Each structure stands twice: as C-alpha cells, then as structure tokens.
Amino acid sequence: HTIICERIGVDCSCFAVGPNDFATRTAAEKRIWLRAISNLKVKLKNKASDPSASDLRHYRDSVKEQVLSTRLEPSGRLPPS
C-alpha cells in the first residue's frame, strides 16, 4: 500500500506519494494530480484491463478540461500566457 498524503495549509500545493514529496504550482493543480493518482491506484487495485485508445482520449480530455478550468480568471477567460 502506497500512502498518498495531502499537505494541509492555506493554498498549499504540496503532497506526498509514499516517501516522495511533490509540489505543484497551485492548490488546484495539486487536486488534479491527487485525483489522477487516486484513479490509478483504484485501477491497479482492481486489476482493470488496459485502457482502449478511446478511454485514453477521454481521460486526457477530462484532465485537459480540469487544467483549463483551474486557469480561468474570474471573468471566465484564460489569463494571458
């Protein structure tokens, strides 16, 4: 069992997976990583079959949507790059 630990703090962007510590740019990005890692653990634990090309496309689109939604300004537009 690999322990996933979210560091707690105001707008904290740190977490740990087993003995490894990670830092993201934002707390929102940390939530995306934790969700992805958690999903992988569930699939491995349940011995899920390999994902199809369609499954991978769906997963990637979902992650992309989450990333873009975390980058939106209050106006609903993406900040300047």
Image (spheres, rainbow, N blue to C red):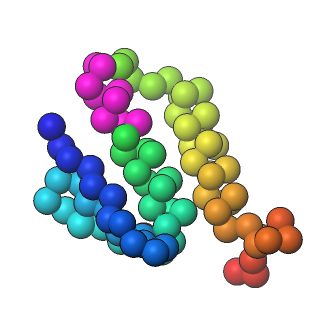
- Please give the name of the residue rendered at 34% of the width and 29% of the height, measured from the top-left corner: 42
Instruction: Decide which of 51, 62 is in the foreground and name it.
Output: 62
Q: Indicate left or right for 22 with 31 as reference.
A: left
Residue 13 % position (x, y): 42, 70
Q: Indicate left or right for 50 with 45 as reference.
A: right
Image quadrant in which you'd find residue 15: bottom left
Image quadrant in which you'd find residue 33: bottom left
- Dominant SS in magenta: helix
Q: Is residue 31 above or below residue 53?
A: below
Q: Is residue 42 above or below residue 3?
A: above
What is the magenta range?
A: 39-47
- Which residue of the protein is positioned furthest toward the right in this rendering? 75
* Badge count: 0
- Please give the name of the residue rendered at 20% of the width and 47% of the height, measured from the top-left corner: 3
Q: Is residue 45 inside the magenta stretch?
A: yes
- Please give the name of the residue rendered at 37% of the width and 18% of the height, measured from the top-left corner: 49
Q: Is residue 73 above or below residue 57?
A: below
The N terminus - image quarter = top left
- Which residue of the protein is positioned furthest toward the bottom in this rendering? 80
Residue 45 % position (x, y): 26, 25
Q: Is residue 46 inside the magenta stretch?
A: yes
The C terminus - image quarter = bottom right
Residue 29 % position (x, y): 51, 63
Instruction: Decide which of 5, 57 is in the foreground and name it.
Output: 5
Residue 73 % position (x, y): 76, 72
- Please give the name of the residue rendered at 67% of the width and 68% of the height, measured from the top-left corner: 71
